[in-house]
Image (tube, grey):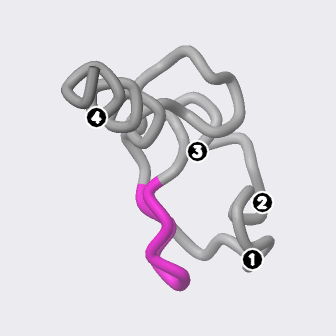
Amino acid sequence: MKIKRENETLKAALTCKICMIEKVMCTFLLCGHFCTCLSYGEQVSHCPLCRMIKTGF
């Protein structure tokens, strides 16, 4: 059961925080959050976790 829980935790950590489907592919440069897929990383103007303005990813 512990391994199953760890596996679910890792999957959640590596899943886009916006679409909840795709794998995380973008790191927001100013805040360092690794939280969106490439599609949403290109579309958003702020980090979805801390709302810091995006200057690059």
Determine which residue is flagged by label 1: 53
Q: Secondary structure at mark 4?
A: helix
Residue 44 sits above or below residue 28 on the image: above
For the residues labelled 3 and 1, the Cα–Cα distance comes to 12 Å
Instruction: Give, as a three-letter code, the residue at label 1.
Output: Ile
Q: Looking at the picture, how far across and down is residue 50, in whole percent?
A: 73, 73
Residue 5 sits above or below residue 21 on the image: below
Q: Nearer the viewer, residue 13 or 41?
A: 13
Determine which residue is flagged by label 4: 6
Determine which residue is flagged by label 3: 41
- What residue span does the magenta drawing correspond to? 27-34
For label 2, the crowd category at 10 Å Cα-Cα, with few meaning under 14, some 14 to 19 and many 20 or more, is some
Q: Is residue 35 left or right of residue 42?
A: left
Q: Is residue 32 magenta?
A: yes
Determine which residue is flagged by label 2: 45
For the residues labelled 4 and 1, the Cα–Cα distance comes to 32 Å
Point out the tag, 4 or 1, that comes first from the N-terminus. Answer: 4
Residue at image point 74% right, 56% down:
48
Task: Kindly check if marks 1 and 2 are in contact, taking CB atoms under 8 A apart as contact.
Answer: yes
Instruction: Give, as a three-letter code, the residue at label 3.
Output: Gly
Q: Looking at the picture, how far across and down is residue 31, in whole percent?
A: 54, 81
Q: Looking at the picture, how far across and down is residue 49, in whole percent?
A: 70, 63
